[in-house]
Image (spheres, rainbow, N blue to C red):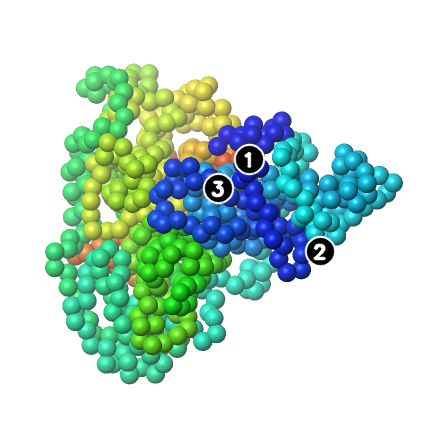
């Protein structure tokens, strides 16, 4: 969404009709809300109508405190601070009195671009940039009008600062004292948003509102929440996706002290499982361990990773469905050639907080507490499963410890699972809430992985080192096929998430085709989605081409970018300048690596310093050049890039792969599935290109370029080009 806000106009934002005032809650105050038109095409992807009750985004209380409802999930990315900053800036609020609160599921909180309440696509700040600022500006205008009426002066004679309206003759009134009067006023027809030059808060490094609570252990996460008297449930899931319980013996499980019941429930992908309901987590776990289950796997595909990769290599060796075509010279006429096959495994999201959910099911209503990225989907799924209408389901958004896409599942797998357990619990004559908890083993075995892929590239260069031909084939599962988003992201049988990040913005003659396969392994978006593999392929191949051309890899990229990509050039040049690349001598045994990638409309360039000792690579330093247009909170952007770089580094480490044998996932916990840890963390310096253009997303763009930059440094040290993630120097 591009909005002409630089001149202070709110074009591209919501009309007056899009705003609502709600009745003041207990204690009085000004409350403003927001509604989304149903015309957005993505709104139709959600099943069932969302509740129509108004929900407030902003409340100014008589004590001058300002509470901003955050219409997203806060799971580490910083929206609990960045979104309140937007309102506070236009409101001229006293930042020390501003608080954030996660909004429940509701129509008012739908993403202005997607038409559904969600957190994903790195769109939280980008999509709500105008929306939240307009709310603040309207509230400020109403407070000024209320003060002007009390003082019998013109609104133009008043100004605001830090939660206070100032009038002629030294008059002043706090927002809290004016809130009730402002609530009675009509909403302003028009508001003028600030010019960036007027910003006092936005663009300044701002500590997070939730930092103290989280660092002190006082923050309540979804995993911490358990209503009084609530029972805990664990589920024995089928070992093969879609398998069903054939028969079981629960006698030993029920003999465990604290176990209350064992019930069979439907689970995701048409399978079934057994839920053990107990007084707490430990008896539920012991009870589940004691179950004896025979599983029916008849008719199910049993995927084995080795066989799948072999099949993918064979597929990628021949053209697939055309995705892009270019006029190229015949490969046979090329002076230099690159022939490369890349392999990428399934990846688990593995957030620090595994999936969990509390459900309190009554005869005519249901209350859910969960750290959801997909409130609209999950509320509708809970209602459908419970046999209720969406408006009968109250869905509370809880703080979550990471997600990276795993809490945004179109099937609402664990939400449906929890409601089914609550139904069984209620059907047995019990009352009260039930808390479903997935263990780490459940999380790693539970599916919805980043798909595995194989790329096959054949590239031809002329005697000047210019790329004159590039034939490229990708084989791997489609993420969007079969989901509510298929109609928007799959065209001519090709999933756009499979090919995003290929080619553009570089001027290369790319002929791209795809084999989107099917497999009995549930797949899902993973932080930065398709760019997790396409950036690695693109940036390592371009580096190899630069080496063949005997041209500096930075200069080679700049030539391919041309003059039409100023943001890419600015990010690359900033990273190069700040790192000392090309000017600073590195220690013996160290080498530079460079990579650049755009995802979610933001550009990140990395210049890294790495070494290899006794066959083991080590990443020492990372310098990031970031172009995300206007940086709402530079401190959050820095944290996002640091976290993304570490997560990407984890994909390069031995053991960072989900593998299957006979349909069963082989990894169960972090002793088998590698993630980056504190000793792996390099020094990371983040630099942001100045801009006053509307912001673009930063939750994911820091992931894609890290692994290829690291691989390019290793190639300089070893002479070996890495074609697999995780890295394997022995077979390179």
Q: Position of residue 205 (x, y in %)?
A: 62, 43
Which class describes the residues within 10 Å of circle 2: few (<14), some (14-19), or many (20+)? some
Residue 502 lies, in percent from the top left, at 33, 31
The correct choice, above or below, for 94 with respect to 632 in the image is below
In the image, which disc is placed on residue 62? Answer: 2
Disc 3/disc 1 C-alpha distance (Å)? 10 Å
Sort mark 1 into few (<14), some (14-19) or many (20+) by Cα contacts within 10 Å: few
Q: Position of residue 344 (x, y in %)?
A: 28, 43
Pointer 3 local density, CA inside 10 Å: few below 14, some 14–19, many at least 20: many
- Of the image marks 3 and 1, the number of the one nearer the N terminus: 1
Q: Secondary structure at mark 3?
A: loop
Q: Which residue is found at the position 24% from the left and 57% from the top?
A: 665
Which of the two discs, 3 and 2, labels the residue nearer the N terminus? 3
Determine the residue positioned at 33% across, 19% down: 466
For mark 3, what is the residue?
36
Is 150 placed above or below 420 here? above
Query: Can residue 615 be spotted in the picture?
Result: no
Q: Residue furthest left?
A: 298
Q: Is residue 387 above or below residue 466?
A: below
Please name the residue that numbered disc 1 is placed on.
Answer: 15
Name the residue nearer the viewer: 321 or 227.
Answer: 227
Q: CA distance from mark 3 to mark 2?
A: 29 Å
The residue closer to the viewer here, 151 or 131, is 151
Residue 720: quarter of image: top left
Image marks 3 and 1: residues in contact by CB distance under 8 Å: no
In the picture as drawn, the residue positioned furthest to the right comes out as 169
Residue occupying the point 63% across, 54% down: 24
Q: Say left or right for 441 vs 222.
A: left
Q: Secondary structure at mark 1?
A: loop
**Where residue 288 appears, x then y in whole percent?**
29, 73
Of residues 662 and 554, the one nearer the viewer is: 662
């Amino acid at each position: 969404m591009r909005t002409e806000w630089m001149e202070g106009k709110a074009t591209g934002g919501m009309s007056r009709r899009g705003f609502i005032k709600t009745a003041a809650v207990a204690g009085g105050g000004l409350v403003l809300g927001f509604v989304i038109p149903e015309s957005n095409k993505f709104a139709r992807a959600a099943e069932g109508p969302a509740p129509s009750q108004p929900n407030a985004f902003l409340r100014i209380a008589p004590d001058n405190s300002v509470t901003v409802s955050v219409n997203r999930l806060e799971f580490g990315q910083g929206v609990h601070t960045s979104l309140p900053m937007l309102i506070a800036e236009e409101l001229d609020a006293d930042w020390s009195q501003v608080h954030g609160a996660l909004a429940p599921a509701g129509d008012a909180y739908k993403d202005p671009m997607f038409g559904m309440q969600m957190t994903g696509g790195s769109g939280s700040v980008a999509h709500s940039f105008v929306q939240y600022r307009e709310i603040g500006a309207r509230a400020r205008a109403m407070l000024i009008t209320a003060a002007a009426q009390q003082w019998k002066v013109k609104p133009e004679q008043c100004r605001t600062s830090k939660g206070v309206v100032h009038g002629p003759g030294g008059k002043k009134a706090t927002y809290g004292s004016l809130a009730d009067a402002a609530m009675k006023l009509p909403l302003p027809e028009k508001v003028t948003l600030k010019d960036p030059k007027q910003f006092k808060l936005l663009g300044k490094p701002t500590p997070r509102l939730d930092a103290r609570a989280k660092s002190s252990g006082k923050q309540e996460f979804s995993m911490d929440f358990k209503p009084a008297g609530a029972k805990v449930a664990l589920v024995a899931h089928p070992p093969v996706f879609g398998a069903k319980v054939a028969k079981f013996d629960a006698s030993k499980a029920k003999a465990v002290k604290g176990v209350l019941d064992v019930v069979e429930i439907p689970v995701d992908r048409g399978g079934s499982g057994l839920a053990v309901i107990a007084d707490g987590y430990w008896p539920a776990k012991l009870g589940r361990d004691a179950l004896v289950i025979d599983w029916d796997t008849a008719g199910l595909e049993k995927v084995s990773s080795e066989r799948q990769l072999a099949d993918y290599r064979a597929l990628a060796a021949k053209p697939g469905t055309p995705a892009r075509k270019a006029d190229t010279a015949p490969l046979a006429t090329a002076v230099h050639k690159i022939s490369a096959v890349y392999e990428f495994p399934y990846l688990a999201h593995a957030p620090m907080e595994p999936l969990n959910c509390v459900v309190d099911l009554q005869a005519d209503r249901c209350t859910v507490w969960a750290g959801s990225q997909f409130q609209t989907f999950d509320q509708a799924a809970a209602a459908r499963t419970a046999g209720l209408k969406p408006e009968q389901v109250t869905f509370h958004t809880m703080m979550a410890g990471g997600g990276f896409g795993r809490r945004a599942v179109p099937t609402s797998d664990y939400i449906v699972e929890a409601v089914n357990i609550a139904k069984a619990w209620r059907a047995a004559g019990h009352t009260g809430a039930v808390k479903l908890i997935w263990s780490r083993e459940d999380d790693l075995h539970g599916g919805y992985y980043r798909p595995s892929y194989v790329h096959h590239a054949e590239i031809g260069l002329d005697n000047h080192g210019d790329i004159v031909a590039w034939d490229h084939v990708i084989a791997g599962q489609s993420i969007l096929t079969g989901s509510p988003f298929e109609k928007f992201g799959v065209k001519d049988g090709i999933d756009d998430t499979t090919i995003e990040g290929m080619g553009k913005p570089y001027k290369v003659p790319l002929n791209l085709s795809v084999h989107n396969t099917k497999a009995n392994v549930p797949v899902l978006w993973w932080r930065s989605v398709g760019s997790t593999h396409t950036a690695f392929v693109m940036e390592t191949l371009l580096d190899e081409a630069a080496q063949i051309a005997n041209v500096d890899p930075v200069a080679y990229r700049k030539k391919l970018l041309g003059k039409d990509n100023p943001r890419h050039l600015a990010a690359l040049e900033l990273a190069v300048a700040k790192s000392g690349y090309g000017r600073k001598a590195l220690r013996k045994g160290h080498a530079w690596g460079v990579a650049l990638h755009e995802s979610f409309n933001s550009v990140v360039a990395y210049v890294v310093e790495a070494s290899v000792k006794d066959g083991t690579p080590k990443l020492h330093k990372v310098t990031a050049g970031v172009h995300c247009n206007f940086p709402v909170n530079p401190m959050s952007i820095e944290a996002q890039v640091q976290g993304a770089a570490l997560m990407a580094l984890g994909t390069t480490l031995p053991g960072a792969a989900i593998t299957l044998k006979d349909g069963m996932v082989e990894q169960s916990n972090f002793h088998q599935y590698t993630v980056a840890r504190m000793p792996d963390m390099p020094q990371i310096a983040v630099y942001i290109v100045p801009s006053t253009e509307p912001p673009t997303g930063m939750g994911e763009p820091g992931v894609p370029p890290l692994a290829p930059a690291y691989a390019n440094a290793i190639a300089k040290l070893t002479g070996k080009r890495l074609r697999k993630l995780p890295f394997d120097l022995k077979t390179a």
